[in-house]
Image: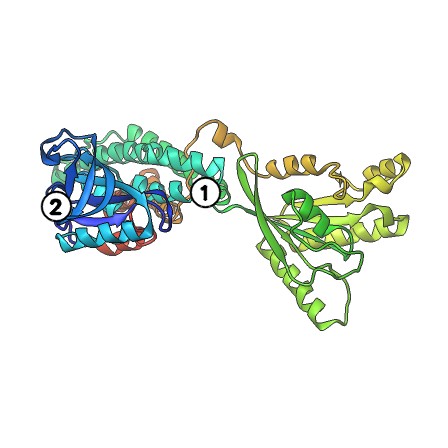
Amino acid sequence: MIQQDTIVALATPSGVGAIAVIRVSGKDAISICASLFRSVNSKKIEKQKSHTVHLGHIMDENRVLDEVLVSIFKGTQSYTGEPTIEISCHGSTYIQQEIIQLLLRKGCRMANAGEFTLRAFLNGKLDLSQAEAVADLIASDSEASHQIAMQQMRGGFSTEIKALREELINFASLIELELDFAEEDVEFADRTQFKELISRITEVLKRLIDSFAVGNVIKNGIPVAIVGEPNVGKSTLLNALLNEERAIVSEIAGTTRDTIEDEITIGGIGFRFIDTAGIRDTKDVVESIGIQKTFEKIEQAQVVIYLVDSSLLTVDSISELKTEIGKIQNKYPQKPLLIVANKIDKLEQNQIDHLISEIENIHLLSAKSGLGVEELQNKLLDFVNTGVLRNNETIVTNTRHYDALLKALEEIQKVQYGLDTGLSGDLMAIDIRQALYHFGEITGEISNDDLLGNIFANFCIGK
């Protein structure tokens, strides 16, 4: 990307709306826009102060394109760190395109995906992890994902990484200095303090790496598979959880022949519920395919709700249910399994008491009436460690960051081994340099064109 160009793009979603914002950034942004803008007060925008807004008209020679508001950001006092103009025009797609085409004719070029944020990074307004958080903030669709993106955009994650990197650089310089005096056999780096630092870095890296398990599900939502035999109320439960008639409900067994998915937010966390075909022996080819998909969805899900019809449970069927539960738990030992008994509105109290005593941690509800549905949602929240959110801890959500942290930890553990075994300074220095490299990858102290291209290609145009 040529940073000397003046770029333009629509900063608001395309389509008709009340207003649209067209962003122009680059060294000639103000002079180009000044040649098109006629202020109602005859002001020259190139002479106005930064961070001021002016009413006027965009003119294509003598033709008025629109009445607009022009916001001025001079010098480095802008999002991109370079002169920027934002034109707020009426939201007609015709007006938007007319203004953009006019700007292109006057010397601007269309911005590439994420180019405004890339310039903010290159001009030192954001580090790389903060720049990536901008995309996460735009994509956030729940309270939790918004909170994490905001914390990262404010620099919480990068501040922690930079502080560790700075301390490690200080010790690395002392180790490197020792190499220059190898013949004198002197130590400039206090090995006791160095061990304490490596231990602290290891602890922080492990905490950040562990947080990715929480961050990933918060960012992408938690897939929950609703499984069970036909006609136990899986589709009714999905509708109750979503509070809408999303799935077809019928007394006929085998109605759901494919998976149905939808998402809701519970307690600020996104959940993706998957209603699956009922599991049973069948000769129906289509239904068999649906059942096969059910097992595929169980593989993909992070939580499984195994639903049973409590009104049909007998002594023998409870025993069979326990066996079936055991099979699923043995097949997916790491996957949380919630046993949920539906249609409890049809049971007597003594039957309910018997069910609770026979099956440990069973959850009782009536999907049709909504009884117990809210309690089920609260149980699902228990599978997410929301404590780290409440404590405002740093949470890693970015796969690239996670990979860099794993590699940094591997190098730090090599340094730890070197300290424990009395490894020579020149060999330890190699591992320290590698650890520093992976830290730098996260914040952008170390980057390359391919990496930046991959990151910013995922941004929307205009950001």
Residue 197, horizontal then vertical, whole percent: 32, 31
Q: Residues within 10 Å of mark 2 (few under 14, many from 20)?
A: many
Looking at this view, is 135 or 31 the one in front?
Answer: 31
Which numbered dot is residue 56? none
- Say whether disc 2 or disc 1 marks the residue closer to the N-terminus: 2
Please identify, in this view, whether the residue under mark 2 or under mark 1 is nearer the observer. Answer: 2
Residue 258, by quadrant, is bottom right
Residue 116, by quadrant, is top left
In the rendered image, the quadrant that contains the N terminus is bottom left
Residue type of the residue flagged with mark 2: Ile
Mark 1 residue element: helix
Q: Which residue is mark 1?
A: 212
Q: Which residue is mark 2?
A: 32
Looking at this view, is 182 or 378 the one in front?
Answer: 378
**Horizontal placement of 279 versus 317: left or right?**
left
Looking at this view, is 355 or 198 the one in front?
Answer: 355
Q: Is residue 427 visible?
A: no
Looking at this view, is 61 or 160 the one in front?
Answer: 61
Q: Residue at x 78, y 52 (%)?
A: 232
Q: Residue at x 23, y 34 (%)?
A: 171
In whole angstroms, how far apart are the C-alphas of marks 2 and 1?
Answer: 46 Å
Residue type of the residue flagged with mark 1: Phe
Residue 398, by quadrant, is top left
Q: Residue at x 70, y 55 (%)?
A: 248
**Horizontal placement of 94 versus 302: left or right?**
left
**Horizontal placement of 24 versus 93: left or right?**
left
Above/below status of 46 relative to 16: above
